[in-house]
Image: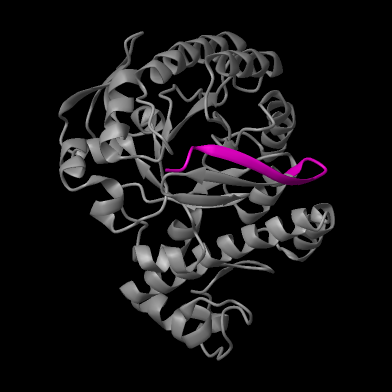
Amino acid sequence: MTDFHFELLNSASTARRGRLHTKHGIIDTPTFMPVGTAGTVKAMFPESVKATGAQIILGNTYHLMLRPSAKQVKALGGLQKMMNWDGPILTDSGGYQVMSLAKLRKITEQGVTFNSHIDGSKHLLSPETSIAIQHDLNATITMAFDECTPYPASYQQAEQSMQLSMRWAERSKQAFIERKGYGIFGIMQGGMFADLRKISAQMLCDIGFDGYAIGGLAVGEPKEEMLAMLEIACPLLPIQSPRYLMGVGKPTDLLDGIARGVDMFDCVMPTRSGRNGQAFTDLGAVNIRNQRFREDSAPLMEDCPCPACKNYSRAYLHHLVKSGEILASMLLSWHNIQFYQTLMQKARIAIESNCYTEFHQSFLNDYETS
């Protein structure tokens, strides 16, 4: 059985090419993880997700504990078996969703008591319960339970939040049941304060995790602040461990993150955009609802292998979106996930060829930010 471990295969400046070995398969990095919050990547079959080249997907503790429940997922054989995905799955600890979705939440040292946004029922998420739920879900990668520091936050707020997250990180690690091929990631916090980020990184390293996430970014701060903090945060983390930037983002954000040493990303953007008629291309994002596509017989992208591009015209996709057809969401979501996976593949090749800086700049030159 495979040990959970990370191989750093090559570097091009601070961009990294690696390989993460897990019980459920190998993950080539840098990688983008499609989000399957409730046990499904929206509007896509698991087979379709795999066809794009995705090697790992996300599930979410908060949503799955509420519906259908961790116990039911376990009874059905875990997330992999339940949703017919045989690859690795990373589960978010639920900390962010508790803060953003739950009603009547109360934070104490023990954890977070909250009322479900679905039916108002009362629940407790603590480091111990979050880790236990992720165990029942059969998460390949478990995330430590943390408090996502909001933006903006004062120094005092960021420090208190970070220290609480670090105490919860230690409890999360203690609650985690070690199994061959499974891993647990700690989450760095500290807001926009470099010294707090350094303290957080040191505390996480002292606890000892299999990988390290950079939390509290992409929460509303200007992109320049996010990138500046990444330049500070990444070198603070162990070289021989994977680094995961949570909740990011646009194609340009991914490449900017890779340039600063990030290995793993996730975001709802490609599928959410697909459901709203937006498609990503090498020349920028396009709104297929636009009237200019009404009679456009060309494919969405000439060299894209997804069914939307291989089998259908822009005019047909425009018609599907304007008609509110479910097929529009399916085809555009598939295309967007394919676009992200192809972008990651190109990034890996560029790092292997020691030309990532040139590849990154060339993409930015062609891409029109919306």
Q: Please, is residue 95 above or below residue 32 in the view?
A: above
Q: Give me the residue at 61% from left, 49% from top.
A: 29
Q: Is residue 231 left or right of residue 183?
A: right
Residue 354 seen in render: yes
Q: Is residue 187 above or below residue 171?
A: below
Task: Write down the quadrant of residue 192 in the picture.
Answer: top right
Identify which residue, 114 or 179, lies in the foreground. Answer: 179
Quarter the C terminus occupies: bottom right
Q: Nearer the viewer, residue 241 or 96?
A: 241
Q: Position of residue 73 (x, y in %)?
A: 20, 43
Determine the main secondary structure of the stretch shown in magenta: strand
Report the residue at 67% width, 34% height from top.
Answer: 226
Residue farthest front in this picture: 1
Q: Is residue 277 visible?
A: no
Give the residues in magenta.
1-15
> Which residue does the image show at 17% across and 36% down from the upper left?
71
Instruction: Indicate yes or no whether the magenta region holds residue 9.
Output: yes
Q: Position of residue 25 (x, y in %)?
A: 46, 51
Residue 108: quadrant of the picture: top left
Q: Residue 325 appears at what percent x and percent y?
A: 32, 76
Query: Which quadrant: the N terminus?
Result: top left
Residue 252 is inside the magenta segment: no
Q: Nearer the viewer, residue 54 or 28?
A: 28
Residue 256 percent location from the top left of the image: 71, 46
Task: Look at the picture and state if 289 lies above or below 316.
Answer: above
Which of the 4 image quadrants contains residue 176?
Answer: top left
